Amino acid sequence: MHNLTLNFTVLFTGLHIAVNWGWIASVFKKRLSIPKESNGAFSPNIMTILVRIGILILATGLVSLVWYSIIGKPSLTRLHNQNEIARFSPSLGHGTVQFLGETFLLVIIAFIGRKWLRIRL
């Protein structure tokens, strides 16, 4: 059930990115460009964006640690022989590879939706 939900979420997120690609690209161009004259509008630079991303990552880690301290380790009853949970040993490397794989899949779906299916608003 979890994997099926994840697959549909990645599929629809990729198609959503494909549909809104023009808007996304224009927002990033406006945010990352250096304004020729200041009109009082707020336009963060790269360092501001990286700091915000870092704060988001730290906040996510903090929430994860709080939940782990409240809920605790997964129960041993979930670990059975010959199933996927039993043979998977979670680590930072495995999580990074899974994250990069899901991101790559999302990019492929957005590319296919944008270029081959000609999805537009």
Image: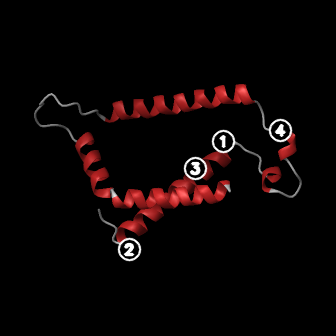
- Please identify, in this view, whether the residue under mark 1 or under mark 4 is nearer the observer: 4
Classify mark 3: helix, strand or loop. Answer: helix
Compare marks 1 and 3 and give the one earlier in the sequence. 1
Compare marks 1 and 4 and give the one earlier in the sequence. 4
Query: Where is mark 3, residue-wise?
Result: 99
- Could you tell me which residue is drawn at 38 percent across and 74 percent down? 116
Classify mark 1: helix, strand or loop. Answer: helix
Q: Which label number is shown at residue 116?
A: 2
Drawn side of residue 93 relative to residue 86, left or right:
left
Q: Nearer the viewer, residue 120 or 35?
A: 120
Furthest toward the right, the residue is 81
Q: Which kind of residue does numbered mark 4 sit on?
A: Ser
Separation of residues labelled 1 and 3 (CA atoms): 10 Å
Mark 2 and 3 residues: CB-CB less than 8 Å, in contact?
no
Q: Which kind of residue does numbered mark 2 sit on?
A: Trp
Q: How crowded is mark 2: few (under 14 residues within 10 Å), some or many (20 or more)?
A: few
Query: Where is mark 1, residue-wise?
Result: 92
Q: How crowded is mark 4: few (under 14 residues within 10 Å), some or many (20 or more)?
A: few
Query: Where is mark 4, residue-wise?
Result: 75
Image coordinates for residue 107, horizontal then vertical, percent = 45, 59
